[in-house]
Amino acid sequence: MKRRNLFRTAAALALTAAVAVTPAFAQETFTLKMAETWGPNFPIFGDTTKSMAEMVEKMSNGRLKIRIDSANRHKAPLGVFDMVKAGQYDMGHSASYYWKGKVPNTLYFTSMPFGMNAQEQYAWFYHGGGMELMQEVYDEHNMLSFPGGNTGNQMGGWFRNEIKTLDDLKGLKMRIPGFAGEVFAEVGVNPTNIAPGELYTALERGTIDALEWVGPALDLRLGFHQIADYYYTGWHEPATELQFLINKGVWEKLPADLQEILRVAMRTAAYDMLTHSVHENSKAWASIQKDYPNVQVKTFPDEIFEAMVEANTRVLAKAAEGDEQAQRIIQSQEDYLRDARAYTNISERAYLNTMAELE
Amino acid sequence: MKRRNLFRTAAALALTAAVAVTPAFAQETFTLKMAETWGPNFPIFGDTTKSMAEMVEKMSNGRLKIRIDSANRHKAPLGVFDMVKAGQYDMGHSASYYWKGKVPNTLYFTSMPFGMNAQEQYAWFYHGGGMELMQEVYDEHNMLSFPGGNTGNQMGGWFRNEIKTLDDLKGLKMRIPGFAGEVFAEVGVNPTNIAPGELYTALERGTIDALEWVGPALDLRLGFHQIADYYYTGWHEPATELQFLINKGVWEKLPADLQEILRVAMRTAAYDMLTHSVHENSKAWASIQKDYPNVQVKTFPDEIFEAMVEANTRVLAKAAEGDEQAQRIIQSQEDYLRDARAYTNISERAYLNTMAELE
């Protein structure tokens, strides 16, 4: 006998016996409304929320459902933080660094320039104190925050001209938002933000000279490879992690088994997004290489990276000035990265370099 | 009212009304017996099975329990395949390549020399046809097979003398089991297998000249760094994935929600093991570096890798001779690796090299 039938049988019996257990059945089912920053059917990111919701519904046998509203419905892609905090939505899917203008220390939980890669960052979140620091920041805002999916190492962006010296960056108009834009500004770039739908035209018409978006899979759809020859390797977002947000009151109302189902589904969906990103980026990059031999992969020369690392340190120090919490977070990331990268260098990096030399 | 209380109430009512629904309650709870290849409390690997069982029990609110037997109980560390196939155990946790003597094509689902790294291999499993090929191999043996946790890139092993030329490998006695041992044998190494508990003494007394185990975290516990100065970077197991096995009849008896709970818990536990491995390896490597400055990290010279890649191709070709299924699996991995690695090279590898040059 299936459980649902069993419930019906039990409910019928309860009524027969005139014992009021019906309200208990009603409490068993929850539907959570989730606002995502992305538009409907946004590739990879949107697959992550859908897959999370499906796992939750199947595992709970329909007792917990998640209704996803994309940006076209709630009209507030960057309002997810406020809407979940206020309880207007139960959950959100977005990126923590979008809230840095409002709550500066949310910056540190997406990806930092010259920071950890995805595997290192997951290790920091789950074993190195990262989850606890993130929760400390969100505690004051009535929300729980969880990793929400990783894009992997983002590319440094599309440039119409090759960048050979630090001078080539002076006055360069580039779409690069957020903290990375601030770092780039320190070395002379003129950073701007432009809506995704206008990026191609802006680059084509010379309104901007360069732009960064994500990586091959999402870049390919926007067509930048048709009008820019130089694709630079990454430095500014080595492990962009999205975010699931949950209103605390909503979380606390869920029974322990549904909390665990939700926690595990979010965790799996986040890891799965990294796997999915590797797959889609591999396919897209193979397609760009085949059809657009004009595209050359470049890495900035050392003098540029050296200047940017210094700039990054300055901008970080300024962000942390007089903020004890920010200082603790930055220190935790720096300490963790030191040991994790030493190991990554003798394992993953050494192996990849060995294989590349054999080609 | 908690669901368990509700069940009790409903059960009580059912009895009062003299309707036999009690058997249905009994069917609701399942306890699966799982045999793991590892001894009790084996670090990282054993944490993975415990964490999987905990997630399952919490998510199912106790309806599905997994009882783990370590090797000290079932006494058959390499008998897991047979015991799960026969239904003596419901589930197993082991590594697919342990069964290659019995079912040759199980070899390909753990890690292959010069093959995919962990992120690439997860992408192959979940998006590149890997799961389907693995299931095709296990279908004939009445089992389902799932990824069971990744160690990350394994180190090439501990050597008492530096390896400078291909000649230095001739006649070298090394503990390196399995397929990698066959490849090493092709370039003159004399591979042997020795039980873990005897490895330290064998290396100390010169019974062997070198050995490979796993990586810093598990190697540190066995103390090889105290008696060998050269720690070589990896090539033979770039992404060792463990395995959950489930007897098909057992799987089919589970209701759909418990199947999904089990599937998602295994998937999360597997990913989590990679994260845990990165963390433990980072800590252990920092500790070795601090306390044992004698330890030097080395990479084999190009002539050795070139000879081993050729040897690997020969051994693989031999394994696949006249075996259409093996040929399809090898081809699928080769094709997937080509595109995935091209992307890894412009993203992860480029970033790690940039950072290393800045140090």
Image (cartoon, coloured by chain):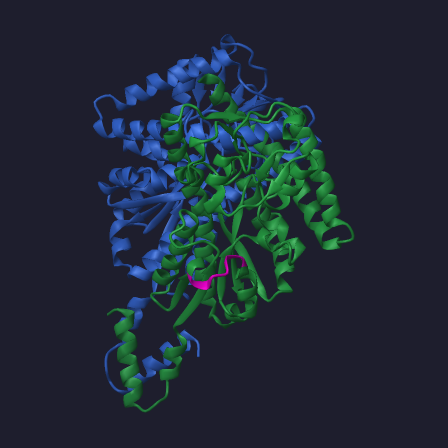
Chain colours: A green, B blue
Q: Where is residue A156 in the image (x, y as percent from the top left)?
A: 55, 34
Whether B71 is among the magenta residues is no
Classify the position of the N terminus of chain A by image quarter: bottom left
The image quarter containing residue B16 is: bottom left
Q: How many marks can you see?
A: 0
State whether residue B58 appears in this view. Answer: no
Q: Where is residue A231 in the image (x, y as percent from the top left)?
A: 50, 30
Check the image and report above or below for A21 versus B82: below
State whether residue B64 appears in this view. Answer: yes
The image quarter containing residue A284 is: top left
Query: Between B260 and A96, which is closer to the camera in this rendering?
Result: A96
Classify the position of the C terminus of chain A by image quarter: top left
Magenta residues (range): A73-78
Which residue does the image show at 36% across and 61% down from the upper left?
A59
* Farthest residue, direction right: A322
The image quarter containing residue A293 is: top left
Check the image and report above or below for A269 versus B232: below
Whether A74 is among the magenta residues is yes
Query: Between B171 and A262, which is closer to the camera in this rendering?
Result: A262
